[in-house]
Every structure is written in structure tokens, then in C-alpha cells.
Amino acid sequence: MIAPFQDSKMRWLVALCSLLCCWFLAFPASAQVEITAAELDRGEAIAADAITAAERGDFATAEHYWSQLIERFPSNPAVWSNRGNVEVSQNKLDAAIADYNQAIQLAPDAPDPYLNRGLVYERQQDWAAAIADYNRVLEIDPEDAFAYNNRGNAAAGQGDWAMAIADYERATEIAPDFAFARANRALALYEIGQKREALHEMRSLARRYPVFADIRAALTAVLWVQGNQGEAESNWVAAVGLDSRYRNLDWVREVRRWPPAIATALERFLTLDAPPSS
């Protein structure tokens, strides 16, 4: 299972100028407020500033910018959905859901607000609601690899490993280079006891993506409990050099949301609980 911060990614609606024009023209003349080309250009610049602020982790400033755009362009779904994204990053989950709801009301056939709202439902462990949103995304776009991956994450949250694995496999069929979906499948296979196949997939991913911190940490856990201590420690040096958060088991379990079996294996490594020598 993968948390929203990495593979279950929120999607930005960034084509702001064209969206503003389209949505302005879609409303009846009695509801329109005249929008000049200069105002559209200014809106595009504010949107760029909002995204830049979010990229540097200044989510409060990004939220302020999106709020400015909402005041001026309230009928545009992009600005509502994007503000929801930065609210999620500040753990303002109820506010984010309200913004995604507004985006969905304005654009019921746009997939991204459903995808983003599903991520919030996952954070709240409302697996059924998350799955319903991902199902809606797939109704709109049956080839959306992120929706399959995210639905797999929510199914894993329910303990439905068969559904999770099937969704991860479908995600990688659609997007063969979707490394996190492949990693998710490997972790799920390990959870259901298919450890040889899981290890094979982890090794394959590590060869193809040598700076993939998540798979390096997973290999550490698997190899440690198998007694391959030297190789486990080598992968660990790579993993924490790339992302030190794997030192924190609470983060691994609650944020990254590794399945129980491999999280326990990592705990054994971190506590130096070595397997008995053969």
C-alpha cells in the first residue's frame, strides 16, 4: 500500500488560462462578469506563483493564491481542485473535501477532483468512499493508471489483497514504467506469502531504478529476515541516503502504509533482530 505523498499523487489542473476561458463561456450571459485578456494573464501568473509556492513547501502561501483566484473565477473547477490539493498538504482534510466537492459540482465529468478526493478519503481510512471515487474516475477514463493504483491502495486498506494486486497489475499494463504500482504489487505479494515472486520483482525494480528508495528499503527488510544480512545492510545505506523517513516505523506503517508483513520485517532489521543462523 502506498500513501498519497508518493505514488497516489494529487493531480494539478494547470491549464488555467484555457480553462478560465472555456468555463467563462460555458455560463449564461446573465451570470457572466466581463473578464479581460489582462485579467486572464494575471490569473495565469497567480496560478504559476501558487504552484511554485507549493513546490517549495509553502502551502499556506499557495492556498492564499488559489483563494485569490477563486474570488475572481469562482466558476472554474481548476482553482477549487488545486486549492484542495494544498489544503491536503496542510492536513485540512475537511476543507479539501469541500473544495473538491465544489470542483465536482462545476465539472462532474472531470476525473481529477474525484481522484484527489479519493486520496483524502484514504487518509481518513474511508476505504469505501475512496474506492467509489476511483471507480468514477475509471468510468470517465478506463485507462487511468493512477486510478487503478490508488484503488488498489484502498482495497489493501480493506485487506482485500486479491483486488489490490489485480489493480496494481492493471495499472502497470496501462503504464509499464509506473514503478510504484509495480512496487505495490511486490509488497502485496509478500503480504500473501508469495515471497519468492515478491523478491524477484523487488530485485528487478532495484536494477532498473537504483535510486528508488522505497524498493531499497523493502529489499532491506526482505533480505534481513532471509539471513542475507550483508546485502540487506547495503540496500539500507542506499535507502536512507535517498530518504531518511524509512528509519521511522510509524511513518512506514501509517503514512507510507506498508503492508503488515514487510513492515514487521523492517522492524526486525531496525531492532537488529537477526534470524537464526542455519
Image (cartoon, rainbow, N blue to C red):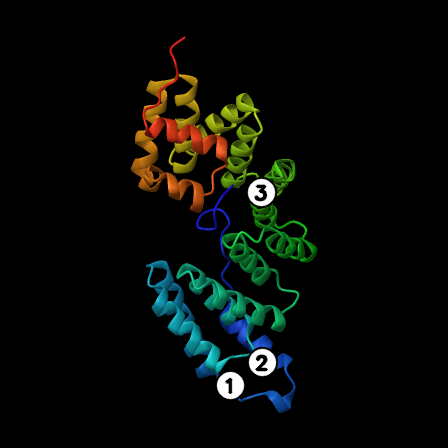
Figure quadrant of the C terminus: top left
Q: Residue furthest bottom?
A: 30
Residue occupying the point 46% across, 31% down: 262
- Mark 1–mark 2 Cα distance, whole angstroms, equals 8 Å
Residue type pointed to by label 3: Ala
Q: Are marks 1 and 2 in contact (CB under 8 Å)?
A: yes
Q: Is residue 136 among the parts visible in the rendering?
A: yes
Label 1 or label 3, whichever comes before in sequence order: 1
Instruction: Work out whether residue 148 or residue 52 is closer to the camera in this orientation and state it.
Output: 148
Mark sitting on residue 35: 1
- Mark 1–mark 3 Cα distance, whole angstroms, equals 40 Å
Question: In which quadrant of the rendered view does residue 209 lie?
Answer: top left
Q: Position of residue 62 (x, y in %)?
A: 38, 68
Q: Position of residue 91 (x, y in %)?
A: 42, 60
Q: Position of residue 255 (x, y in %)?
A: 43, 47
Q: Secondary structure at mark 3?
A: loop
Label 3 or label 2, whichever comes before in sequence order: 2
Q: Which residue is mark 3?
A: 175
- Mark 3–mark 2 Cα distance, whole angstroms, equals 34 Å
Residue occupying the point 35% across, 64% down: 53
8 vs 12: above or below: above
- Position of 74 compared to 226: left or right? right
Q: Is residue 212 among the parts visible in the rendering?
A: no
Q: Which residue is mark 2?
A: 24
Mark sitting on residue 199: none
Q: Residues within 10 Å of mark 2 (few under 14, many from 20)?
A: many
Q: Residues within 10 Å of mark 3 (few under 14, many from 20)?
A: some
Residue occupying the point 38% across, 42% down: 250
Q: Secondary structure at mark 2?
A: helix
